[in-house]
Amino acid sequence: MNDHVQQNLKIIQARIREYEIKYQRVPGSVALLAVSKNQSLEKIQQAIIAGQKSFGENYLQEAIPKIQFFAKENLQWHFIGLIQRNKTRKIAEYFSWAHTVTEKIIAQRLNDQRPQNLPALNICIQVNISQDPAKGGIKLNEVLPLVEFCVSLPRVRLRGLMVLPTQNSLSNEQATVFSALKILYEDLNRKGFFLDTLSMGMSDDLETAIAEGSTLVRIGTGIFGSR
Ligand SMILES: *Cc1c(COP(=O)(O)O)cnc(C)c1O
C-alpha cells in the first residue's frame, strides 16, 4: 500500500485544498514539498510522473546523487536538514532553497558560494519556538538580527520562517507553536520585510499547520510511505 505514491499525492493535495477552504485560506496558497529523504529513485520518479516538482532532502550525501539523476526534470530541491558550516558550498550549488538557516556565518557562506549562473538561493530561518533541545533553530529574540543580516546579502533571498515542532506533541501544543511563528512572521512583514513563506506542517500535523497559516507543508511519509 505504501507503493501508491501517485495515489497518496492526490490524497494529500485534496486534503490541502480541503483545509484551505475549511480555514478560509486563499485557494492554492499552501504549497506542497515532497520530502524524499530515505526514499528510492523509483518512488521519486512516481511523484514526478504525477506532476510533483518540489522535493525536500535532509542529507547532502544522499541528496546530490538524486539531484544529479533527475537533473533533466527541472525540479526544485529544498534542503531541510541541519546545515553544517563546512557543507554550505554543496547546498549553494545544488539546491533552490535552504529552510534551516540559523546563523549569520551560514547565511554569509551560502551567499558567497551561490554560483553566479543561478538565481539567488531562497532561504528560511529556522526558529525553535518551544526551545526544544532536540530540534534546531534559534530563539525568538535572535530572529530579527538574523533577518536584517540576511536581507543585506544579494545572493540569498530571505523568503520566510520555518519550524519543526517537538515530535508527538499534542495538537494544541503544535497549534501554539505554529501560531507563534505566524505572529512573528506578520510582525516582520509589518516591519517592512517582504516574507512570503511559512514553512510548517508535516504528515502528522498538516491540518493544524494549514489552520495556523502555513504556506508550505513538508510531507514525507504521507506521500512515500514509511522510511
Ligand atoms: C522528515 C522531515 C519532514 C517530513 O516528515 P513526515 O512526517 O515524513 O511527513 C518534514 N520536515 C523536515 C524538516 C523533516 O526532516
Image (spheres, helix red, strand yellow):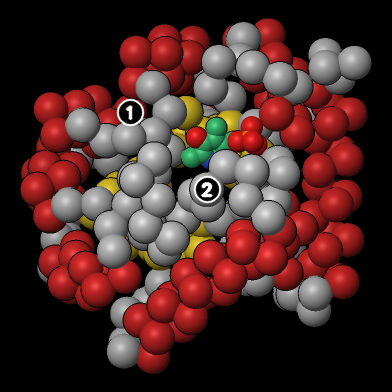
Residue 20: mark:
none
Residue type pointed to by label 2? Thr
Q: Quadrant of ligand 1?
A: top right
Q: Nearer the viewer, mark 2 or mark 1?
A: 2
Q: Nearer the viewer, residue 180 or 33?
A: 180
Regarding residue 61, the answer to whether it shows in the image is yes
Q: Secondary structure at mark 1?
A: helix
Residue 112 is left or right of residue 142, and the answer is left
Q: Residue at x 83, y 14 (%)?
A: 3
Q: Residue at x 83, y 17 (%)?
A: 2
Which residue lies at the image location 74% right of the left edge and 75% below the top edge?
A: 25
Q: How many marks?
A: 2
User: Compared with residue 173, is residue 33 higher up or lower down, i.e. above or below?
Assistant: above
SS state under label 2? loop
Residue 18 percent location from the top left of the image = 88, 61
Name the residue beneath numbered marker 1. 94
Which mark is drawn over residue 166?
A: 2
* Amino acid on which disc 1 is placed: Tyr
Given residues 57 and 44, the one toward you in this image is 57
| Residue 172, quarter of picture | bottom right
Q: Up-down: is 102 above or below 172?
A: above
The reply to whether residue 157 is in sight is no
Report crowding for label 1: few under 14, some 14 to 19, many 20 or more residues within 10 A (C-alpha).
Answer: many
215 horizontally vs 130: left or right: right
Q: Where, by quadrant of the figure, is residue 150 drawn?
A: bottom left
Occupied quadrant, residue 225: top right
Quadrant position of the N terminus in the picture? top right
**Mark 1 or mark 2, which is nearer the start of the sequence?**
1
Q: Quick check: 42 left or right of 84? A: right
